[in-house]
Image (cartoon, rainbow, N blue to C red):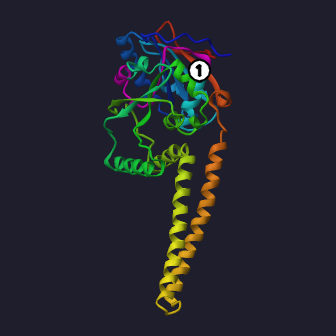
């Protein structure tokens, strides 16, 4: 049973951080120290939920005790690797049922989402209330030139097929009431930010520079970027299908008009139907047939997008969560694993 929620106060005192991690435990440990420093300075009661997305490396090796400023540290172990976006959805749903706070912050665990930027996001949460989610809008990126070029190409591709700009990632903050609104979004399992926008939940955007990884190398190569882009676009499957349906229908009409124009021009000159006109008309007829087939396929894609609700965070999160372990401080200052939480 969900824990009763208190109303969000005008002054945020308790903050819950939900951070998905896959084998990046050393970087996550460094991030926790930075978060603790910011939390002490801001006077928050900070709790952290690290979502272990089926890591191949044991988190107990590199993850130390909670640093000063972190009031509670939990590791939610998933049964298998489900991907970054679904790990966020599962972590948020688990937190919704087993924790409470004035505000929730979603961020990556490698340090590229800077703890120093969190106060700027949380400052907008009272303004957003239960109505909106506050997202970090990237003011600049710190990756290589090649990655930036690939990312720019993805943004152009995304804009053409969905009609929407890509401006935000996972880094965000929200009130507990706003979190409650996200629990019924099936698209959360594919892409967190796109799901919020698809549900027409208002998004406040705060310009925020991107940091650098604290340790290790990033796992976002070209293939991973393509997969991530497809996941984001899958949320807009209905819109993409509708756009492609209109485009393919236009292609059919244009091809048929071309056939009629070629044959009409040939007969108008009184030359009968020359071979070139017949060949051109035949090619356009093939184009028209292919466009018709594409229209049928895209129609089914649109219909499927309207009925595909296989994953609901609040209903299904427990199928993915194996256990949640609290990392505690011992008397000697060393960390140890407490009993399973939640």
Q: Position of residue 67 (x, y in %)?
A: 43, 15
- State yes or no: residue 100 in magenta: yes
Residue at (50% x, 6% y) in the render: 331
Of the pair 222 and 316, the residue shown nearer to us = 316
Of the pair 231 and 272, the residue shown nearer to us = 272
Residue that protrudes farthest toward the top in the picture = 331
Magenta extent: 95-120
Where's the C terminus, which quadrant?
top right
Residue at (53% x, 57% y) in the render: 246
Whether residue 342 is situated above or below residue 240 in the rendered picture: above
Of the pair 105 and 223, the residue shown nearer to us = 105
Where's the N terminus, which quadrant?
top right
Of the pair 100 and 31, the residue shown nearer to us = 100
Q: Position of residue 238 (x, y in %)?
A: 57, 47
Q: Position of residue 54 (x, y in %)?
A: 58, 34
Mark 1 is surrounded, within 10 Å at the Cα level, by few (under 14), some (14 to 19) or many (20 or more) other residues, namely many
Judge from the rendering whether residue 44 lies leftward or rightward of residue 341; answer left or right: left
Number of residue marks: 1
Whether residue 35 is situated above or below residue 275 in the rendered picture: above
Judge from the rendering whether residue 201 lies leftward or rightward of residue 183; answer left or right: left
User: Do we see residue 112 in this rendering?
Assistant: no
Helix, strand or loop status at disc 1? helix
Whether residue 231 is situated above or below residue 332 in the rendered picture: below
Q: Which residue is mark 1?
A: 96
- State yes or no: residue 103 in magenta: yes
Residue at (52% x, 22% y) in the render: 178
Q: Position of residue 167 (x, y in %)?
A: 39, 38
Residue at (35% x, 24% y) in the render: 117
User: Do we see residue 244 in this rendering?
Assistant: yes
Task: Using the rendered view, name the quadrant where residue 87 is placed.
Answer: top right
């Amino acid at each position: 049973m969900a824990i009763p929620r208190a109303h969000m106060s005008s002054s945020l005192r308790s903050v819950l951080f939900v951070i998905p991690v896959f084998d990046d435990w050393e970087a996550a440990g460094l991030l926790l120290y930075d978060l603790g420093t910011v939390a002490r300075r801001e006077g928050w009661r900070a709790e952290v939920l690290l979502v272990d997305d089926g890591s191949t490396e044991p988190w107990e090796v590199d993850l130390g005790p909670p640093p000063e400023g972190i009031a509670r540290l939990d590791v939610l172990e998933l049964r298998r690797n489900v991907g970054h976006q679904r790990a966020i959805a599962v972590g948020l749903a688990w937190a919704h049922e087993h924790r409470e706070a004035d505000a929730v912050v979603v961020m990556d665990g490698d340090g590229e989402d800077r703890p120093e930027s969190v106060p700027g996001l949380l400052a907008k949460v009272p303004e957003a209330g239960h109505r909106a989610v506050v997202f970090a809008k990237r003011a600049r990126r710190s990756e290589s030139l090649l990655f930036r070029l690939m990312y720019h190409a993805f943004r152009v591709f995304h804009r053409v097929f969905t009609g929407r700009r890509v401006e935000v990632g996972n880094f965000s903050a929200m009130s507990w009431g706003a979190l409650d609104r996200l629990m019924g979004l099936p698209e959360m399992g594919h892409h967190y930010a796109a799901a919020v926008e698809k549900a027409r939940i208002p998004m406040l955007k705060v310009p925020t520079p991107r940091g650098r990884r604290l340790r290790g190398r990033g796992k976002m190569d070209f293939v991973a970027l393509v997969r991530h882009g497809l996941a984001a676009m899958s949320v807009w499957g209905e819109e993409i299908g509708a756009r492609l349906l209109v485009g393919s229908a236009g292609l059919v009409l244009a091809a048929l008009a071309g056939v009629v124009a070629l044959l009409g021009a040939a007969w108008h000159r009184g030359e009968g139907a020359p071979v070139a006109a017949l060949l051109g008309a035949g090619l356009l007829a093939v184009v028209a047939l292919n466009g018709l087939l594409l229209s049928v396929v895209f129609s089914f894609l649109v219909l499927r997008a309207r009925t595909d609700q296989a994953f609901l965070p609040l209903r299904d999160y427990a199928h993915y969560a194996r256990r949640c372990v609290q990392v505690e401080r011992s008397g000697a200052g060393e960390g140890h694993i407490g009993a399973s939480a939640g």
